[in-house]
Amino acid sequence: MDLTADGGGRTATASTPLVVKPWIPAAILFAAAATFAIGSTWDIQWHADVGPDTFFTLPHLFIYASAAVAGFTGLAVILHTTAAGRAGREVDPALGGPGIGVFGRTFTAPLGYLVAALGAASFLLYGLWDLWWHSLYGFDAVIDSPPHIGLFLSSTVISVGTVIVFAAARGQRWGEIGALVSLAHLLTSSTVTALAVQRLSQGTVRWTVAVTAFMAILLLIAGAAFRRGGATGVAVFASAIQGVFWWFAPWAARAYADFVGLPLREHIRSIPTTPALIPFCLIPVGIVLDLLLRRTTAPARLLPLLAGAIGGAIIAVLSFEQNTLIYDAHWPLSSIVTGTTIAGAVLGALGGFLGHRFGAMLRLTAPAPEVHA
């Protein structure tokens, strides 16, 4: 009998393969991440259109259910792979990536599910903090409270784990497409986390815009490094998600307000709050990044930084035009536009560097051949 062992201590036999289809827990994990996106978009719109809320609301149920599903899915896969290794059964490397020994290799955790489970655990801790926060201060009037930012960061960790899970199956069509969709979901969700620095945007730099540019470039270039044309693919999927939530957010807030018998704020414009944070220019930027990364003559090690700087500058400067279109705002002083554009370019270059490394890591999560469209 052919016995093998992976880096995490998983023992396997080729004659007794693991019966779990890798796409099943991957789909459940992505559904959990998407559930958080639904709940958070709904909750933020509620704050904008209706007002403060309590801990126990329907949008919050979606938010916490997402973490519970992600946590139990990760735990189930970890226990299953651990039991399979001990029984001498083969563990498909497409099931979440390489095995990581946990607690002295007592457990074997596929990398993607380990990351997602850790994110779910931290989500629970921040959820308890949020409950305590509500018990002290009652209603929530703002979205960028400390426990909320912690919840968004924890959800980001879950989404990163989801990306890794799909990337580990990049040799199969569902894995490759799922990785790009997961990156797009991570992009659209992570823009909310940029609100953590909005109170710093009082000088000549709009740091919320610059941080949004950083995260968008990081994930777009990660897609480009993962697959040829990946930046454009991630941008297309992210724009589609943005379009769906543009309709969903105001509708959900209004429908829930009618259901519980609460009035909407006076003179509201029902502008989709969360989708409005996502750059409108993602698809053109994705195309530019793919072209720059493939066709320029600059040294290969400088390409991600150069592409990231250009992409970050484009997102930063066009954000002011986006605000004009959505909120009928005027362009700010030239010093603010210049400072924000420079900050977007600098953070974009950093995002390009980190995104290229993250994309390379995704390619290494499974020793599988490329699948091209």
Image (spheres, rainbow, N blue to C red):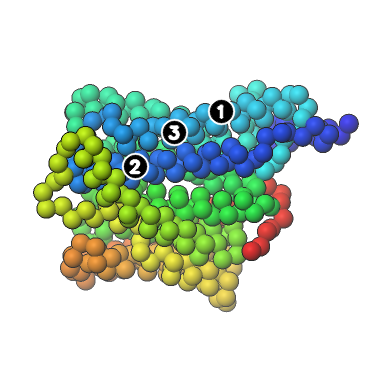
Determine the residue positioned at 62% across, 36% down. 110
Label 1 belongs to which residue?
Answer: 75
Q: Quadrant of the N terminus?
A: top right
Q: Position of residue 209 (x, y in %)?
A: 31, 58
Please tell me how many numbered marks the rendered image carries: 3
Label of residue 67 in the image: 3
Q: Give x and y (percent) for residue 140.
A: 21, 35
Instruction: Assign the C terminus to one quadrant of the image.
Output: bottom right
* Residue at 35% over, 32% down: 61
Q: Amino acid at mark 1?
A: Leu
Q: Residues within 10 Å of mark 2 (few under 14, many from 20)?
A: many
117 left or right of 133 in image = right
The residue singled out by tag 2 in the image is 40
In the image, what residue occupies the spot 38% across and 54% down?
244
Amino acid type, label 3 = Ala
Left or right: 18 as drawn, with respect to 329? right
State how far apart marks 3 and 1 are (Cα).
12 Å
The percent position of residue 55, horizontal first and vertical second, equals 27, 29
Label 3 SS: helix
The spot of residue 283 in percent (x, y) is 44, 66
Asked whether residue 293 appears in the rendered view, the answer is: yes
- Inspect this view and state whether residue 98 appears: no
Determine which quarter of the picture holds residue 73.
top right
* Nearest the eye: 9 or 252: 252
